[in-house]
């Protein structure tokens, strides 16, 4: 069976991106993705002390239960941002605030 291709046919990926943009769902998806990226990139040692991970307006707020760990991580925030963005495949985070 030979089916004619429609001019405005788009890939599933393109249709999904359009749906997400139209319904303003990207920020919620980014929030979930960044939490998963934080867990993968920083590992169990840091995750044990992580109380919350919140993304707002390209700023990642991370609440930690260890002040020593907070100080240690604060020395490498630009590298952490770089690794998280790389893990997510695009620039989602511009600033990291450790609390």
Image (tube, rainbow, N blue to C red):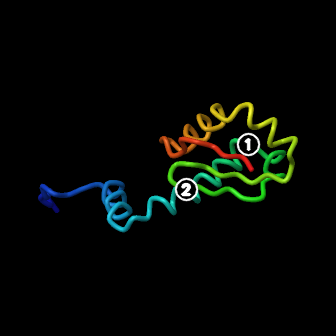
The percent coordinates of residue 52 (x first, y second) are: 72, 59
Looking at the image, residue 50 lies above or below residue 25 = above
Q: Position of residue 40 (x, y in %)?
A: 69, 46
Residue at screen point 73% across, 42% down:
42
Q: Quadrant of residue 77?
A: top right
Is residue 58 visible in the rendered structure shown here? yes
Q: Residue at x 78, y 53 (%)?
A: 50
Quadrant of the image occupied by residue 68 = top right
Residue at image mark 2: 56
Up/down of 97 relative to 52, above or below: above
User: At which x and y percent is residue 46?
Assistant: 80, 46
Disc 1: which residue: 42
**How many other residues sit within 10 Å of disc 2, few (<14), some (14-19) or many (≥20)?**
few
Numbered mark located on residue 84 in the image:
none
Within the image, what quadrant is residue 54 found in? bottom right
Front in this rendered view, residue 31 or 10 = 31
């Amino acid at each position: 069976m030979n089916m004619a291709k429609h001019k405005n046919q788009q890939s599933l990926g393109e249709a999904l991106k359009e749906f997400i943009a139209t319904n303003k769902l990207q920020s919620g998806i980014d929030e979930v993705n960044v939490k998963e990226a934080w867990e993968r990139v920083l590992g169990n040692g840091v995750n044990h002390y992580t109380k919350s991970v919140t993304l707002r307006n390209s700023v990642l707020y991370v609440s930690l239960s260890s002040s020593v760990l907070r100080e240690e991580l604060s020395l490498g925030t630009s590298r952490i941002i770089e690794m998280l963005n790389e893990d997510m495949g695009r620039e989602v985070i511009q600033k990291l605030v450790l609390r």
